[in-house]
Amino acid sequence: MIKKLSVIAASCMLVFMAAGCSSKGSSPSNTSAVDTKNTDASSKASVTLEVLNISEYMDTPEFKAFIDRFHKKYPNIKIDPISVPHEQYINKRNVMLASGSVVDLIWGNGVDQFDAINKGFLMSIDEAAKEAGVDMSKDFGNFKPDKDGKYYRFPIQQNNWMLFYNKKVFDDAKVPYPDPKVPMTWDEYAVTAQKLTNNESGKNKVYGMFYNNWGMYYYGFGSQLTDGKFYTSDGLSNINAPEFKRSLEWMNDVINVKKAAMPVAEYISNNTDFLSYWNGNYGMVVGAQWYAQLAATKKDKFPREWKAGIAPMPVPKEMAGKHMNWSSIDSLAVPKNSKHAKEALIFAKEYVADYTLSTGTLPMYNKIDANKYFQELADKLKDDGITVEQIKYLFGGDPEVINVAEKPVFGAPSEYEATFLDQLTQYYTGKVSVDDTLKNIKQKVDKVIQDQKNK
């Protein structure tokens, strides 16, 4: 969702409810380490930037306060935000890019941006970044060029995935909390989810596991096993590899055998969304830090009396004891039809140095004081019993974490993800076998990859 989030947005608990409200019009204290020079931004001529992003990020007091600060700092760069609800964002963005509409900066996750790169919609930002005072090879750590040695994405954050859990559900079921440092295996996670699930109905029903109808919840176990190998050596789909089959079968066991998660058909028919986890009727969910970030804007809609906990995301038994992460980078990009690439990247730099921090998220921009960020976030989570050590370990501070690809992003990534989600429903509703499902996905995705290569 994040395919919906596309990224749907692609949220924590009060955890981040507090973190998301830290700005309210004042410049975040974490920006003290950022170079605040105007980088020659105040040119004589005034320009207006058309900035396309999801409404979950744009329609917030934090974003509006950030825009006010930006306009004061760069009075000759005006921002015209184009805010689109997340469930409509991908279609709107694709239509604008394909039609040549004027837009200067667009948000997206890895699938979105690589899809646009492959279709020739984005420009290389190497030179414009230099003009904006950004060194793409140094200012974002180990961030590599995207294609042909060039950068097309301005990274906002790398998603850091972890296990969020409801302490009340664990207490009611008399099940011990997950270890704060040692991850459960997926098999242990499934058994725990079954123990947390009750047999009640209606508003009292509790499922041990919540999931989102996004690709990584079905194939992510396989990505850990294959080190993110979604493509074969000749660039075609690798989705029929035995590791991905094992991943889909694991999910089927949890949903249809252990009955520890909502059936897929019910999930879809109920229009369940990723924020539904916060209603308190689920024991655990694997999610990234954006769970917290987005929940911060939903305090009134999702009030919470229960306490939350965080732990490492589960791993295959072959990786027992290792800290792993599904790695995906949310970023901003400049479409080819933009006339103001330099100004767009000045805005992008301020976005990661200022606004991203005000939402309680650690950006990849390495001029930020990360330790100060970790401590401030931990201070906001004291009531949940979450420590600064846990925060640092799970929110990007563990240098030993093993990152594997969250999604396929190279050949036909948008079609790959959409085809996968469309086909797998038939498997989880018992209409098609797992082998035939994976065979159908591979055939359809391979055809799109070949067609795109031949254009």
Image (cartoon, grey):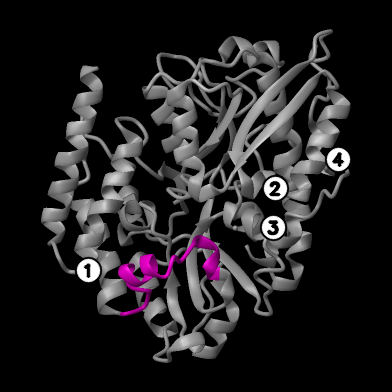
In what element is the residue under mark 4? Answer: loop
Residue tagged 2: 59
Residue 452, position as x, y percentages in the image: 25, 24
Q: Residues within 10 Å of mark 2 (few under 14, many from 20)?
A: some
Mark number displayed over residue 27: 4
Residue 425 vs residue 147: left or right? Answer: left
Q: Which residues are magenta?
A: 259-277
Residue 364 vs residue 260: left or right? Answer: right
Q: CA distance from mark 3 to mark 1?
A: 34 Å
Image quadrant where residue 71 sits: top right
Q: Nearer the viewer, residue 66 or 373?
A: 66
Of badges 2 and 3, nearer the viewer stands: 2
Image quadrant where residue 34 sits: top right
Q: Earlier in the sequence, mark 4 or mark 3?
A: 4
Say which amino acid is labelled 2.
Answer: Asp
Of badges 4 and 1, nearer the viewer stands: 1
Q: CA distance from mark 2 to mark 3?
A: 9 Å
Mark number displayed over residue 297: 3
Question: Height in image: 170 above or below 421?
Answer: below
Q: Earlier in the sequence, mark 4 or mark 2?
A: 4
Dot 4 and dot 1 residues touching (CB under 8 Å): no
Residue 145, position as x, y percentages in the image: 48, 21
Residue tagged 1: 429
Q: Residue at x 85, y 34 (%)?
A: 69
Say which amino acid is labelled 4.
Answer: Ser
Residue 247 vs residue 139: left or right? Answer: left
Dot 4 and dot 2 residues touching (CB under 8 Å): no
Q: Earlier in the sequence, mark 3 or mark 1?
A: 3
Say which amino acid is labelled 3.
Answer: Thr
